[in-house]
Amino acid sequence: MAQGIPDKIMSNTTLIKDLADVAKDAALLQGVLMRIHETPNSSELVTYAPFTLFPTPVPKAVFFQALAVQTHYNTLVDKISQDPDFLEEALASTIAVDDFTARLFRIHQQILKEGRSQSIVLGLNRSDYMLDQGDDGSSSLKQIEINTFAASFGGLSSRTPDVHRHVLKVAGQLEESRRILDNNPAAGLAKAVAKAWELYGSERAVVMFLVEEGQRNIFDQRYIENELWKRYADDQEVAVVYFRNGYMPENYISEKTWDARLLMERSLAVKCPDISTHLAGTKKVQQVLASPGVLEKFFPDQPQIVEQIRATFAGLYTLDMGPEGEKTVAMALAAPDRFVLKPQREGGGNNIYGSEICQVLQGVKESTERMAYILMDKIHPNPVQNYLLRRDGPLKISNCLSELGVFGTYVRQGKDMVMNECVGHLLRTKSSEHSDGGVAAGVAVLDNPLLV
Ligand code: ADP
Ligand code: MG
Ligand code: MG
């Protein structure tokens, strides 16, 4: 591992076994917890959330680049959410063929027609990146996506630094242990929620967490909830709805659930995210933003911000009907391994890779159905060896790829940006055998950057 954990440690199997036990206990002590698969709604049996044995080297320059651009991404998402013409144009082709996005868009239109009942907006985002490895060994920061809805692991990632520090100390790597940064997204996320609550202006009103049916990841949410409990007591009127559920079609199990979403959107509560911010986080919007001249429209007099954001864009290509889309199809079919094909879905496991891209595109390339997707350059991070610790998993060395997430928060009241902050980070690492999938999907595990 370049400037990371010495080989003599990585290959000492007895030591690794001991360190894995030390690490698991440290994770339990620090509260890096998850409920088990078998009983997702009970805390009788809990385990450590999956994580890496060692932190992963991340170059300082790109790490701080990701932090520095976050408040601009917050601003960008917020501007998009206030620009119905842009959203309509950007999503026109998608909603023509993608039912889920179309239904969300219908709610958005109804709210526009009726007028927004609440002028306070709360954004809790996570912008995700991979470090693309250049031929010269350099790595450049490339955005994978931005999550405006239910961006998770701000809670657990507040506790993982102490776990890795401890493991490194036990392994005799004192200097390395000091290179792990403090991280507390939970406090930052809670601070923004509390700000929105305060602006709402009712002592009696509560914050409502809209949670999933199966709640293995409950502790991640509890960290944020507990930060809030330090501040307020319980009651009935809802000042803020914090959605941790509702980002995938499967969450809407009946017409009643769609009615409930509409009801919440029409209510006086501050929505996190509101419907237009939800739509601003779609992969189609991400692709449209990468087209020439679009960022300039949102930052007309700020070329340096445009430059800073654009520097993090990977190649993104439209599959709309017309010559541009035709070009994209031909390009993908000619070299599928260079790309990722993405539908408008969240939560991991939905993207299409390699030869399957050809299969899917052959099926849809002549029809408007292809407009449900976008195409993206595949990012190739430098593989790093590590051990992935998960309950019942074998202890073996894996070739790993990492994804850095940066948490951003903002609160706007009418035209006034009251708060706009970068509140922490998340590093997730997976075995390179897997193309896709996050922690919840059982593929990636929690990690920490070791700045080099
Ligand atoms: P989701 O909203 O489902 O998380 P993502 O766009 O983040 O969708 O993709 C899921 C996973 O697929 C990512 O966490 C990453 O591991 C992988 N992935 C996505 N886009 C790329 C890309 N352009 N290059 C390499 N891997 C990618
Ligand atoms: Mg993702
Ligand atoms: Mg996502």
Image: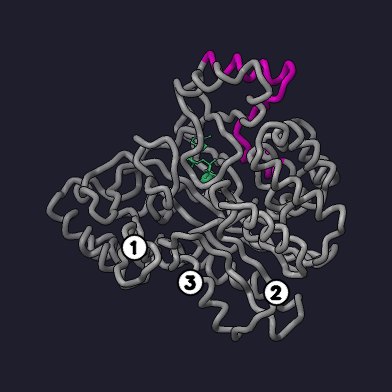
In the rendered image, the quadrant that contains the N terminus is: top left
Residue assigned mark 3: 222
Q: Which residues are magenta?
A: 307-334
Tell me how far mark 1 sits from mark 2, CA to CA: 32 Å
- Residue 355, position as x, y percentages in the image: 45, 20
Given the image, on which type of amino acid does mark 1 rest?
Answer: Thr
Which residue is identified by label 1?
39
In primary-sequence order, the first of circles 1 and 2 is 1
**Residue 273 vs residue 50, the one in the foreground:** 273
Mark 3 secondary-structure assignment: helix
Q: Is residue 69 left or right of residue 442?
A: right
Label 3: how many Cα within 10 Å (few below 14, some 14–19, many 20+) = some
Residue 243: quadrant of the picture:
bottom right
Residue at the image point whose x is 56% and y is 58% from the top: 245
- Tag 1: Cα neighbours inside 10 Å, few (<14), some, or many (≥20)? some
Q: Hey, what amino acid is under mark 3?
A: Arg
**On the rendered structure, is 373 left or right of 379?**
right
Circle 2 residue: 239
Number of the label disc, if any, that sits on residue 404: none
